[in-house]
Image (cartoon, rainbow, N blue to C red):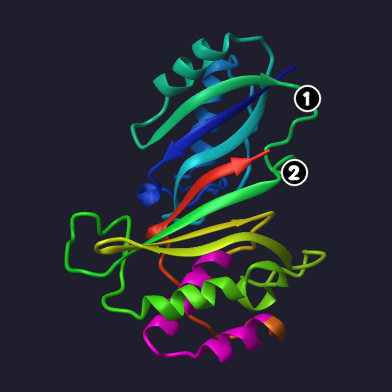
Amino acid sequence: MHRYKISLQYDGSSFYGWQLQPDQRTVQGELEQALTILDKNNRVVVTGAGRTDTGVHAVGQVAHFDLHRAWDNDELCRAINGNLHSDVLVMECEQVNSAFHARFSAQRRIYEYNCRMDNFLLDRNYVWNIGSVDISTMQQSAAIILGEHDFTGFCKYNSDLDHRRCNVYQSLWKPGTSVLTYNVTADRFLHHMVRFLVGTMVAIGRSQLSLDQFKLMIEKPVVDKKIYRAPAHGLVLKKVIY
């Protein structure tokens, strides 16, 4: 068997997330269908670096899979894209050692969340329109989560996890003329973690929550606490670092 690593982008608007789901259109399902055609109808399992939610986009997702025959990297890239719909694009293929694993070999993941503060609507499927907010307090809240913390209070609870600690290397709100962008880099992300963090920080920017309350939520995490969650469509997986 020959193992390949691919980098890809996709518009998550029409997908039921990354992970294979029965009777639902998913990114993993689309890729596996395309690759099974190329591998003479042998089922090809695709493993992604991150399982993005329904509606979440990616410009730097990474995945791996095994094929029975060896392919030229560029030829394989063209062949996969020839069997995909226009809302998924494989940008690069690379044959790798069998020890490579898209998920477990990853060292850091980078996400971006885009919020719009004015009334422009043509990008409404890719930004969360939040209106006027206090950017300064949101920037202060972003700095609170730098370093290693237990994010139990900012994820969809999963009892199968050994722990819910993540090391956050970058957490920063970058204001533009009308779009406010949150950039976050960590060694791992929990289910819904970025969306819960963004939703809560936007609540701080709207004076619905204080910085002290946010800090307490980080320092003393509570399972299944009712907190704010941002919609999926503003979130983008930007890059996976190995």
Image coordinates of residue 104 in percent, x first then y, are 75, 43
Question: Is residue 205 on the magenta stretch?
Answer: yes
Could you tell me the amino acid type at mark 1? Ser
| Viewer-side residue, 116 vs 46 | 116
The residue wearing badge 1 is: 98
Q: Residue at x 79, y 67 (%)?
A: 163
Please tell me how crowded label 2 is: few (under 14), some (14-19), or many (20+) other residues with Cα within 10 Å: few
**Spatial CA span between label 1 and label 2:** 13 Å
Image coordinates of residue 68 in percent, x first then y, are 69, 14
Residue 213: assigned label: none
Please tell me how crowded label 1 is: few (under 14), some (14-19), or many (20+) other residues with Cα within 10 Å: few
Image vertical order of residue 66 relative to residue 232, above or below: above
Q: Residue at x 63, y 41 (%)?
A: 241
Circles 1 and 2: CB distance less than 8 Å? no
Q: Residue at x 78, y 64 (%)?
A: 160
Image coordinates of residue 236 in percent, x first then y, are 45, 52
Q: Which residues are magenta?
A: 193-218
Which quadrant would residue 203 be assigned to in this image? bottom left
Image vertical order of residue 94 relative to residue 192, above or below: above
Would you say 235 lies left or right of 2 here? left
The residue wearing badge 2 is: 104
Q: Quadrant of the C terminus?
A: top right
Could you tell me the amino acid type at mark 2? Phe
**Magenta region, main secondary structure:** helix
